[in-house]
C-alpha cells in the first residue's frame, strides 16, 4: 500500500489551540488520530493530547496488523477517558478535561474507525463524499428525528452542543465504530474538527480535494478558506488526510547495513613472474634511458 498524507492546523479567532492530531506510520499500516479539546472545560488541550499520546503508544506497541481494529480503537478511547477521570481525581477537582475523538486505522487496503463527539471522518472518492461519520450532537439528533432540516443545523443556537465525549463526565462515552471499508486507488480519507466542516460543506470539501497540488497544499488552502468564511468567529481548524496512491505491497523499510566482517590478516601472495618477460622489459627500459641520455648530452 502506497499513500500520501497531509495536515493543516489554524488557530482561528481563538486565544489558544486545543486541537491535537497525529499520523502514526508503520510497515503494516497507518493510524490517523484527531481530537478537539472542549473549550468550555478546563484542560481541553490536556484531554486532546492524552488521546494522541495513548493512541500512538498503543499502536506502536501492538501486534500489527491489528486483528480486531474496532476493539483496538475503542480500547484507546476508553483508556483515555479513564486517564482523564484519574487525572481530575489526582488534582482534587470535579472538572474532568474533555475532548472529541476520531481515529482511523488504515491497513490491508481498508479503513476501520471509531469516533466520539462531532469531529468527523470522511471518505472521498472522485471528489464525492461517499461516507462521513454521524455527529454525536444535539442538532444531529433533531435532524435524525425530522424536527429540523439539514440546512438549519449550521445556524441552530445549540449547534455546538455535543452529546458524547471523552472525559467531562465520570461515565464512559458511547463509542461509534465503523468496520472495514475497502479503499480504491485515489480515495481520500479525511479527519477534521468542527472548525473546518462548520464553514465548508461536504460538496465544497470534495471540490477542493480535486485541486492540483500536494495534499499538504490542498489542506492548507482548505483551512485558510474555512478561517476566512468564519471570521471573526473562527474556531480552531484541524484537518489530516491520507490519499491512497497504490494497493501494491509497500517495500519494507531498509535496515541499516551490517558492519563489514573483519578479514583475517595474511601475508600477501607473491605473484608469479615470467623471468624471460621480465628480462625483456628491463632491457627495453634501459634502451630508452640510454636514448634520452644521448639526446640530453647534445
Image (spheres, grey):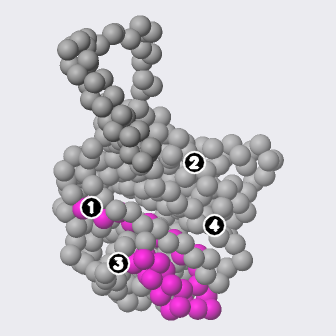
Q: Are marks 1 and 3 in contact (CB under 8 Å)?
A: no
Q: Return the disc, 4 or 3, that comes first in the chain's sequence.
A: 4
Q: CA distance from mark 4 to mark 1?
A: 29 Å
Distance, label 4 to label 2, CA atoms, is: 14 Å
Q: Nearer the viewer, residue 135 or 206?
A: 206
Residue sitting at x 24%, y 62%: 245
Mark closest to the chain's N terminus, 3 or 2: 2
Which residue position holds label 1?
244
Q: Looking at the picture, how far across and down is residue 239, in whole percent?
A: 46, 70
Residue 62 place in picture, x, y as percent? 43, 34
Position of residue 39 relative to residue 175, above or below, is: below
Q: Which residues are magenta?
A: 217-245
Q: Secondary structure at mark 2?
A: helix
Q: Is residue 215 left or right of residue 77?
A: left
Mark 1 and mark 3 lie on one chain; the one further toward the N terminus is: 3
Q: Label 3 neighbourhood size at 10 Å, few (<14), some (14-19), many (20+)?
A: few
Please, which residue is most extreme toward the right here?
A: 92
Q: Which mark is residue 53?
A: 2
Q: Nearer the viewer, mark 2 or mark 1?
A: 1
User: Residue drawn at (57%, 48%), measured in percent from left and top?
Assistant: 53
The answer to whether residue 101 is left or right of residue 114 is right
Q: Secondary structure at mark 4?
A: loop
List the residue tagged with mark 4. 18
The residue that label 3 is drawn on is 213
Q: Secondary structure at mark 1?
A: strand
Residue at 56% of width from left, 52% of height from top?
Answer: 51
Q: Choose mark 4 or mark 1, whichever is in front.
A: 1
Label whose residue precedes the other's in the sequence (2 or 1): 2
Q: Is residue 49 magenta?
A: no
Amino acid at each position: 500500500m502506497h499513500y500520501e498524507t497531509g495536515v493543516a492546523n489554524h488557530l482561528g479567532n481563538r486565544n489558544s489551540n486545543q486541537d491535537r492530531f497525529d499520523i502514526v506510520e508503520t510497515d503494516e499500516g497507518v493510524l490517523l488520530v484527531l481530537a478537539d479539546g472542549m473549550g468550555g472545560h478546563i484542560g481541553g488541550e490536556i484531554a486532546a493530547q492524552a488521546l494522541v499520546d495513548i493512541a500512538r503508544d498503543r499502536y506502536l506497541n501492538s501486534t500489527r496488523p491489528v486483528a480486531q481494529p474496532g476493539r483496538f480503537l475503542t480500547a484507546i478511547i476508553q483508556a483515555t477517558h479513564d486517564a482523564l477521570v484519574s487525572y481530575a481525581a489526582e488534582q482534587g477537582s470535579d472538572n474532568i478535561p474533555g475532548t472529541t475523538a476520531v481515529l482511523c486505522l488504515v491497513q490491508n487496503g481498508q479503513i476501520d474507525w471509531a469516533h466520539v463527539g462531532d469531529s468527523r471522518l470522511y471518505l472521498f472518492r472522485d471528489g464525492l463524499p461517499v461516507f462521513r461519520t454521524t455527529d454525536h450532537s444535539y442538532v444531529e439528533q433533531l435532524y435524525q428525528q425530522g424536527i429540523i432540516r439539514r440546512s438549519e443545523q449550521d445556524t441552530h443556537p445549540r449547534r455546538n452542543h455535543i452529546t458524547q465525549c471523552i472525559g467531562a463526565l465520570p461515565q464512559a462515552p458511547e463509542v461509534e465504530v465503523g468496520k472495514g471499508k475497502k479503499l480504491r486507488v485515489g480515495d481520500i480519507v479525511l479527519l477534521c474538527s468542527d472548525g473546518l466542516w462548520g464553514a465548508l460543506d461536504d460538496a465544497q470539501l470534495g471540490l477542493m480535494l480535486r485541486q492540483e497540488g500536494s495534499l499538504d497544499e490542498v489542506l492548507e488552502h482548505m483551512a485558510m478558506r474555512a478561517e476566512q468564511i468564519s471570521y471573526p468567529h473562527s474556531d480552531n481548524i484541524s484537518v489530516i488526510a491520507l490519499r491512497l496512491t497504490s494497493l501494491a505491497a509497500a517495500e519494507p523499510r531498509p535496515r541499516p547495513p551490517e558492519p563489514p566482517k573483519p578479514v583475517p590478516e595474511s601475508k600477501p601472495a607473491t605473484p608469479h613472474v615470467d623471468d624471460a618477460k621480465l628480462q625483456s622489459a628491463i632491457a627495453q627500459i634501459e634502451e630508452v634511458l640510454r636514448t634520452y641520455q644521448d639526446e640530453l648530452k647534445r
